[in-house]
Amino acid sequence: QEELTSTENKISFSRQNYNDQVLFYNNKIQMFPSNIVANMFSFNEEEFFELEDPSEKAVPKVEF
């Protein structure tokens, strides 16, 4: 049980970290002067990681 909780926490932390980095990247390509370079090299905004199906977010039931 403790390992499952630890794994869920790691996944949650990684998801949050990814979304933080996407936010930073998207803000950076919109702000001057980095937006000039971003436009020259056709950098595009990235999408946040979101689960589309709420059942994927549910905690799995584990039986031994």
Image (cartoon, rainbow, N blue to C red):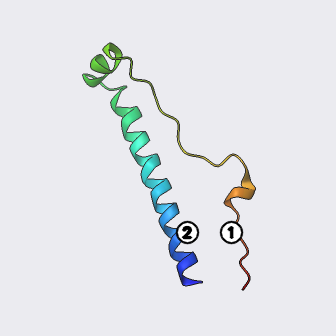
Query: Residue 47 at x, y = what percent?
Result: 52, 36
Residue 39 drawn at (x, y percent): 35, 16
Q: Residue sitting at 44 percent across and 24 percent down?
A: 44
Whether residue 17 sits left or right of residue 31 in the image: it is right
Q: What's under tag 2, amino acid-wise?
A: Glu
> In the displayed structure, does residue 41 sit left or right of residue 58?
left
Q: Residue lying at the far front in this picture: please name it.
A: 64
Residue drawn at x 55%, y 69% as measured from the top left: 8
- SS at badge 2: helix
The CA span between labels 1 and 2 is 9 Å
Q: Nearer the viewer, residue 35 or 56?
A: 56
| Number of other residues with Cα within 10 Å of mark 2, as a class: few under 14, some 14 to 19, many 20 or more | few
27 is higher (above) or lower (below) than 21: above
Q: Which residue is mark 1?
A: 59
Using the image as rendered, state which of residue 20 and residue 2 is in the foreground. 2
Do the residues bearing badges 1 and 2 touch, measured as CB atoms within 8 Å? yes
Q: Which quarter of the figure has residue 63?
A: bottom right
Horizontal and vertical percent position of residue 61: 73, 74
State the residue at coordinates (67%, 59%).
Answer: 57
Amino acid under disc 1 = Val
Q: Which residue is mark 2?
A: 8
Q: Secondary structure at mark 1?
A: loop
User: Residue 25, how many percent across, how many down?
Assistant: 37, 36
**Label 1: few (<14), some (14–19) or many (≥20) C-alpha neighbours in 10 Å:** few
Q: Quadrant of the C terminus?
A: bottom right
Q: Can you say which quadrant of the picture contains the N terminus?
A: bottom right
